[in-house]
Image (spheres, rainbow, N blue to C red):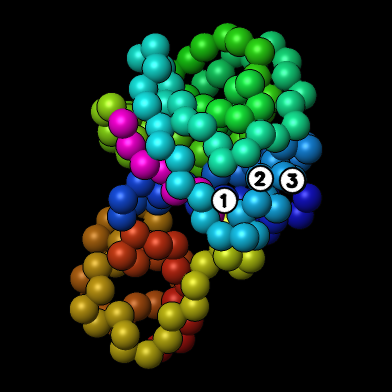
Amino acid sequence: MTSAQNKILISVGDNSMTATLVDNAATRQLLSLLQEGPIEIQMNDYGGFEKVGMLPRSFTTSNTQITTVPGDIMLYQGNNMVIFYGSNSWSYTRLGHIDGATPDNLRLFLGNGSVTVTISSEPAAGVDDIVGDALLNETVYDLKGNLITTRPLSPGLYIINGLKTKVENQ
């Protein structure tokens, strides 16, 4: 799997995080399903350390005993996706890990109780191209989360309206 193919976008409402997938039969099946479009998963808290939800279909398992860390994404029983904001030891098939995940930002991102999570393929380049003055009235942050108020933007990567975006010469 090349690096552009092993990224997915996980969204809850208007907030998104990227995740890096491992290379196994289950993730290849997931990526194939995502080629048809985004999938929505209704996820619920379980055990105080994870969100779990049923996938639209079963995937091939390659279970091993794993101790999870916050941000791990696992396949459980072939048809459930589990996102961990805590730790657990069990037999899972590893799917991947949410990039930059911490227990605090995951709890904030995933919220309490039931939540609808949308999984989609990330664009091949990982960013959208933006040019011109379309950014004058947009909310823009740098990759460290600092609000950027000066315009025009210098070329580089930014978070614009919640999406990682590449800005070229304006």
- Which picture quadrant has residue 49? top left
Up the image or down, 168 lies above or below 162; here it is below
- Residue matched to label 2: 30
Q: How many marks?
A: 3
From the image, state whether disc 1 or disc 3 is nearer to you. Answer: 3
Residue 41 in the figure: left or right of residue 139 = right
Residue 70 position, x and y percent, is 47, 25
**Is 118 covered by the magenta stretch?**
yes
The kind of residue on which mark 2 rests is: Leu
The kind of residue on which mark 1 rests is: Ile
- Residue matched to label 1: 8
Residue 20 in the figure: left or right of residue 162 = right
**Crowd class of label 3 (few under 14; some 14 to 19; many from 20; radius 10 Å):** some
Specify start and end residues of the magenta stretch as a single range. Answer: 114-120
- Residue matched to label 3: 28
Tag 2 and tag 3, C-beta contact below 8 Å: yes
Residue 146 position, x and y percent, is 28, 56
Up the image or down, 131 lies above or below 78; here it is below
